[in-house]
Amino acid sequence: MKKWYSLALGIVTATGGFLDAGTVATSGEAGAKFGLGLIWAIIIATLAIVLLTEMVGRFSAVSKKTYADAIRENFGFRFFLLPLISETIAESLLLAAELGGIAIALSLLTGISWHVLFPVAALLVFVMAWRAPFNLIENAPALLGLLALAFVIGVVALGGPSFHLLPTLWKPEIKPGQLSSYLYLVAAILGATISPYMLYFYSSGALEEGWSGSSLLLNRVTAILGMGFGSLSSIGLVIMSAIVLQPLNLNASTLGEVGLPLARAFGPIGGIIFAVILFATCLGAALEVVLAYSYFIAQGFGWEWGENKPPAKAARFNLVIILMLIVAVVIGLLGNDPQSLALLASTVIALLLPISLFPFLVLMNDPQYLGDKVNRSFLNWAIIAILLIAFVVALVSLPLELLGGGG
């Protein structure tokens, strides 16, 4: 019975935890600007995160090591500094965006400026990361995040996409001058969905919960069904934005605008639902980002780590949490809009994916760690292809978008 409970809980929390500031921002803007023309990118990104989540869970369950442990052990400390630098840049930007998402959600509920609430959001994340047990951090925001399925229900409530809108699914309407914006969103969608922090968090969580070879079924089903169902919320948001915002020529340029389709579908209560969704998803993601980064640092340097350990026994692990939050608060208080910050962070993540994840593919093919559970070749080639697509698109679109005043 406990096994089935863990299986159901894993699927539910993976579904509810799929969205974050990056996926909300990219999905909302994708639908508003290009109709259904970027759903293909969400499908590819979902395939990648399903495969990678299954891999990292399998790696930790079989080898009893985290990704960071194995990098340091297999490639040496100097090599570890390369993904460390890339993750520091990417996750600092993303954490600032997640804190901004929490602040905007609280602003929508209270009417207080999100700028005022930004430090409150950081304090909330700090208190939970400092004191809450791992199971609460992993499950509570994700369970609340199940409300994101309202995006799927909202599509039905709005009558679904019109016959005029459906062709954009396979033939996107890209107006003159919008190609760089289209590619920028492709990269951002890939980066938002394939964020390495999710893998570091998942890997460390597998060890926190004592996974073993008998956990492989739980891992596989959680990855496939949880991430698969979670992506439906993202696709639902794209469709709702295309139905509601595109005809009004609204580009979903702020997180507040992204919530308008739910208000159209469900009335005033829809706005409240969106605020709760944004709060839950960004809170869960902020906790995962700050903990994943702290896990990565502590494991890479060989420090004591663990969310369930008293702070005094993992002092340096907890110090990284504090420093990471301080950096994110400074970035957020520079006046950057959370929507733009989320898009920028997601695109930077896409650009840095090869640095973060190619070493992982090497480890996934090492019998020393996995025995007969190493990757099959088609899995390697599928991930390599997706990572290269993300890298090339980000490399091309990021300079164009920034020089054009976007991002």
Image (cartoon, rainbow, N blue to C red):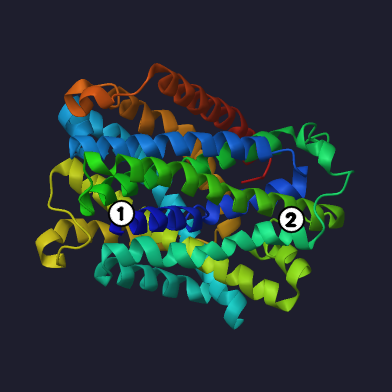
> Closer to the camera, 31 or 139?
139
Residue sitting farthest toward the left: 313
Q: Nearer the viewer, mark 2 or mark 1?
A: 1
Quadrant placement of the N terminus: bottom left
Q: Quadrant of residue 273?
A: bottom right
**Label 2: element kind:** helix
Report the amino acid beneath label 1. Answer: Lys
**Is residue 236 rendered to the left or right of residue 383?**
right
Give whichever of 154, 292 is nearer the camera: 154
Q: Secondary structure at mark 1?
A: helix
- Residue 208, given in percent of the width and then of the height, sits at 22, 53
Please report the residue visible at 41 percent of the width from the left and 21 percent of the height from the top. Answer: 380
Q: Which residue is mark 1?
A: 3
- Tell me the tag on residue 130: none
Amino acid type at circle 2 is: Met
Name the residue rendered at 80%, 58% in the picture: 244
| Residue bearing mark 2 | 240
Above/below status of 193 relative to 326: above
